[in-house]
Amino acid sequence: MELRHLRYFIAVAEIGSLTEAAKRRLHTSQPSLSRQIRDLEHQVGVELLSRSVHGVEPTAAGKAFLDHARLALMHVDAAVETARSAAQPAKKNPFAIGFQTGHEMNWLPQAMQVLHDELKNIHVTVTSDNSPDLAEALARAQLDLAFLRVEPGYDLEYHVVDREPLIVLMPSDHRPTAREPVRPQDFAGEHVIGGSNKATVLRAVTEDYLRRSGLDIKLDHGADNMAMRLSLVASTPGLAMMPADAKNLLPPSVVSRPLEGEAQIDLAVGYSKSNTSPILKLFLSRLDELVRPNQKH
């Protein structure tokens, strides 16, 4: 008797049809399955399955055999899993890092370099998302650390690691592309696309720049993430103020221009104050090593 005999018998007993069991679960032919069942019954010495108007059903002996067959396979599966676990090294400590979309290109290599000496002992997972969702994940202990905006309303600790200048995005055939830098007055009469109410930090910086420039412009539309804003820029058409790293993600239909005047947005390393991870503590102790190579502005 082999394990396949038990698996074949259990499949037929549970599905109630030789044809369906062969096709849906066992991926073999019906004649081959019938032959395997006959071999099993020959070895056991009794009939295990009988045909009825309802299909194929276990006999009284088959019902008694079924429970033990299931238990036998459970023990085999457990033995396999135990052997595999024993062959694996001890599980690594998890460490989850999040990046505001687009920033992983600049910051992930440096972050991994900071952790280089510990990589053999930890399992790093990387997430890319918008800033408010990263803050929520930190607060819920789903992330250990994130590169994000300083989001209000969360009990998080922040260390600013960069101050990014804002640039202006526009369709590649739009009139203000001739300007470099784009001046505040070039916004007059244009659709200015802002972040949604969820993207509070970028929206606040954009509104502050327009207000300081003496422009009474209401932001149009509003998108939760960078991909949506780029689509709105291309299709509206309109202008959008975005952090300089957005240049890494531009489609051919959208171009960027520098912005005249002072408009910056902070990028910070954020984490929960209640997080006691020793890997987080190590990372923060080496934060200066991470910041220095990226101080471009």
Image (tube, rainbow, N blue to C red):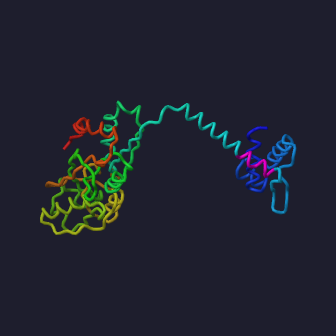
Residue situated in front as seen by the camera: 210 or 13: 13
**Residue 250 horizontal side relative to residue 260, left or right:** right
Q: In which quarter of the image is the C terminus?
A: top left
Q: From the viewer's perspective, is residue 243 above or below residue 74? A: below
Expressed as whole percent of the image width and height from the top left, the position of residue 31 reads 82, 48
Q: In which quarter of the image is the N terminus?
A: top right
**Residue 106 horizontal side relative to residue 186, left or right:** right
Extent of the magenta region: 62-70
Can residue 252 be seen in this snapshot? no
Expressed as whole percent of the image width and height from the top left, the position of residue 196 reads 30, 64
| Count of marks overlaid on the render | 0
Residue situated in front as seen by the camera: 183 or 32: 32
**Residue 20 horizontal side relative to residue 282, left or right:** right
Which residue corresponds to the image point at 74% horizontal and 55% vertical from the top-left? 15
Can residue 69 be seen in this snapshot? yes
Q: Does the magenta stretch include residue 98?
A: no
Secondary structure mostly seen in magenta is helix
Q: From the viewer's perspective, is residue 37 above or below residue 190? A: above
Residue situated in front as seen by the camera: 10 or 263: 10
Expressed as whole percent of the image width and height from the top left, the position of residue 171 reads 30, 59
Q: From the viewer's perspective, is residue 231 above or below residue 284? A: below
Q: From the viewer's perspective, is residue 11 above or below residue 191? A: above
Expressed as whole percent of the image width and height from the top left, the position of residue 210 reads 17, 63
Which quadrant of the figure has residue 282? top left
**Residue 97 horizontal side relative to residue 32, left or right:** left
